[in-house]
Amino acid sequence: MKPLAYIPVFPGTNCDYDTAKAFRKAGAEVKTTIFKNLTSQDVFDSIDEMKASIDECQILVFSGGFSAGDEPDGSGKFIANVINNKTIADSIHALLDRGGLILGICNGFQALVKSGLLPYGRLGKVTEYSPTLFRNDVNRHISMMVTTKVASVSSPWLSSFTLGEEHTIPISHGEGKFVCSEEMAKQLFDNNQVAFQYTENPNGSSYDIEGIISPDGQILGKMGHSERYEEGLFKNISGNLRQQIFENAVNYFLSK
């Protein structure tokens, strides 16, 4: 059976259509729900709906955008607070325990880092020494094509890649600078948790890190918008434009 990819859409999410299309083209079924927050009852109802959807999916996806107006000094906080709700957290841990996969791109990556799902693989582990995502060095939004190289293949998301393989993908963010200590960076590299690195660092990220995975490889977070590739786009851009993370995730379940 086709795996089910579930994409919750939060206030400010704007990459859900591209992400859904990428998963459908890769062979997945896709479900989306709208997280409503006009009233407190809307929030409670949305949490219940999100829990039920996580319980039935194999892939949980937090797509890009500008949640809650791209909160200053903390993009992704709204999503991170939802993730840390006990009802949602329990369902996310159950998803991981049964072998499910989680993806966060751009705003979704920010939420995974600020919730602790990355780099730890579990919620509730964030400390003052944890990595974060901060304002770009140029102190403004950047939108451009960048080249990244594969730094690890220790994940279902990365299974078709080879170390050093390069991809040219779009980025679009104001707070995409991955910041971590030297000690944390050493731990990430030693554990093969650095998934991708920029070949030319556009935002000042520590150690050129563009994306990371959890210790078991089930969770991938990255800033680059791999979902924006479409055949016929970027015709004047050289390089490998198709990053097959979506196909890799779907094939992981189809091969079981």
Image (cartoon, rainbow, N blue to C red):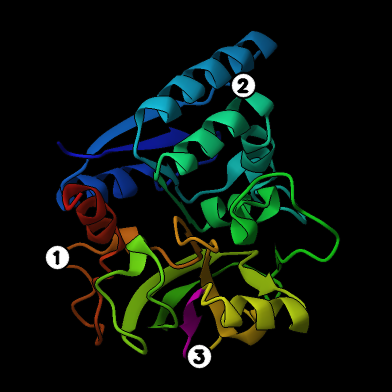
Q: CA distance from mark 1 to mark 3?
A: 25 Å
Residue at the disc numbered 2 = 37
Circles 1, 3 touching at the beta carbon (< 8 Å): no
Residue at the disc numbered 1 = 231
Vertically, is 16 above or below 213?
above
Question: Residue 129: x, y in percent?
Answer: 82, 66
Question: Residue 199: x, y in percent?
Answer: 47, 90
Question: Residue 1: x, y in percent?
Answer: 14, 36
Prevailing secondary structure of the magenta residues: strand
* Residue that sits furthest to the top in the current view: 41
Residue 109's tag is: none
User: Residue flagged by tag 2: what amino acid is it?
Assistant: Asn
User: Residue flagged by tag 1: what amino acid is it?
Assistant: Glu
Task: Read off the magenta span.
Answer: 194-199
Q: Residue at x 56, y 86 (%)?
A: 201
Quadrant in the picture for residue 203: bottom right
Residue at the disc numbered 3 = 200
- Residue situated in front as seen by the camera: 140 or 5: 5
